[in-house]
Amino acid sequence: MYNFFTVTILRFVSIYFVISVFIAAYFYPGGNIHDSLQVGYSFTHNFLSDLGGYASRAGDVNFLSAFFFNFSMFSFAAVGIGFLFVPWLFKDDKINFYLALLGSIFFFVGTIHFAGVGLTPHDLYLYEHIYFAKTAFRILIPAGLFYIIVFFRSSVPNFYAYMTLIFFLFTTGYVIYQLGNGSPRDSIEALVEQVSIQKIIAFISVINIFGLSFGFKSRIRELNIN
Amino acid sequence: MYKFWCVYIPRFFLAYFFIAIGLAAYFYPGGNHLDSTQIGYDFTANFLSELGFYRTLSNEINFISAFFFNSAMYLNLLVGFGFLMTPKLFNENIYSLVCSWIGAISIFIACIFFAGVGLTPADLYFPEHIFAVQNAFNLVILAYIFVSLAFLFSTSSNKYTIGTIIMVFVTIAYAVYISGQPVIDPINQKELFYEKISMSDLRTNVVLQKTVTLSMNISLLIFSFGFADLIKRKGL
């Protein structure tokens, strides 16, 4: 059971998300916020959220792209549920258990917000969409911080602590960047900058979730549980 | 692994399917094939597929309802993969094994078609939607009969085939009923649909479709108990 929730789910959802983004990009009809005539999806001119729009930025029906992207975002709810099982991998140390529990609660709430992103396409529910997208990353900051401490204090190789530290620094940097950046509508350069940074942070988040599954796996082996 | 794919996945799918249908019906704005002013979802006047429409028949945005319904259909893929593990449970004699393989492969393909139903909303891709629905239902009936035969030939209890027997009768009744009904695109051939189909025809069709779907799901649930029993006895 622990292996399924703390390892299998984390790996499956991470891989599924990446594959879904590529499938969604393939089916995206076209358009970005500056150019409705753009054909297809551009990884430097379209936000990930564009994939989940009810209609594309060119105004076309965007059913397939939206379905694959939104369902992959919704799947992150399963990751959140998986994280709720993680504290029991650290139950041999009371402090670690409670720190992991706090981290897991933050991860759970954060991933539920990611699921919310998938349920609120930007062109139908803009306010809710922005709320979910911004809050999700903000909640992951304390989640990452608690797990860094847990990993350093536990017998899990320090590699996972450093990996989570990188995730924590990038997420914090992204949240600070979001507080001060202008609108992507201001210029194409601003759009490309924000789109590129968003892709990098999304990639780091997915890599971190995928990587953590190996840390949890090593802990499961050590405790000799399943 | 066998317990996960053959027992937990079908049960998880069924739980998700019924919750998703409930949520989709709750969020469905309204309209049916003969009355675009209907408010909300009516289980006796709306087909399940209408939950997956891009726009409802009242011409409203149907995002949330479509998301839940289509994702539930899409998750059939997991059930299809799960069934590919089941022949291992019926390896005690050749009849049982062959029937389970035919059943498993048929269900796997049927589940791909069911996922296709979720990926082809009828108001956007009507011919593809009908193609996916018809092939899915035809294959799943064939598959369930073979899985039931696998149970009958095995040392397992015959009680696990009850769901399929009920499903086959309901499906035959549905097939006989719809064989006399014309296939009309309700979006692009609206006038013809109004002319040929009465409200009572529509309700009969809708209720029969729901009954077939329900019996199919009950059958799947009963199979999951049968698989759990075999896994326990074989110590897998």
Image (cartoon, coloured by chain):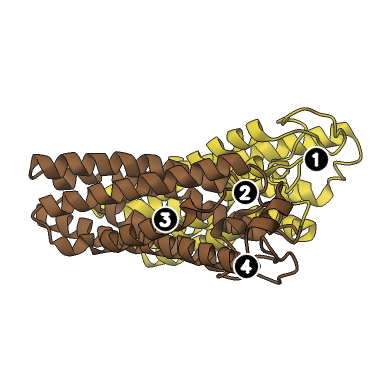
Chain colours: A yellow, B brown
| Image height of A69 relative to B210, above or below | above
- Quadrant containing the N terminus of chain A is bottom left
Q: Nearer the viewer, mark 1 or mark 2?
A: 2
Three-letter residue code for mark 3: Val
Question: Which circle's residue, 2 or 4, is located before the other in the chain?
Answer: 2
Three-letter residue code for mark 4: Met
Q: How far apart are marks 4 and 3 (CA)?
A: 19 Å
User: Which secondary structure lies at badge 1?
Assistant: loop
Circle 4 sits on which residue? B199
Circle 2 sits on which residue? B184
Q: Which of marks 1 and 3 is in front?
A: 3
Residue displayed at 85% across by 36% down: A190
Q: In this view, does A184 lie to the left or right of A22?
A: right
Residue displayed at 47% across by 51% down: B179
| CB atoms of marks 1 and 3 within 8 Å | no
Q: Check chain identity for marks 1 and 2: say if they share one.
A: no
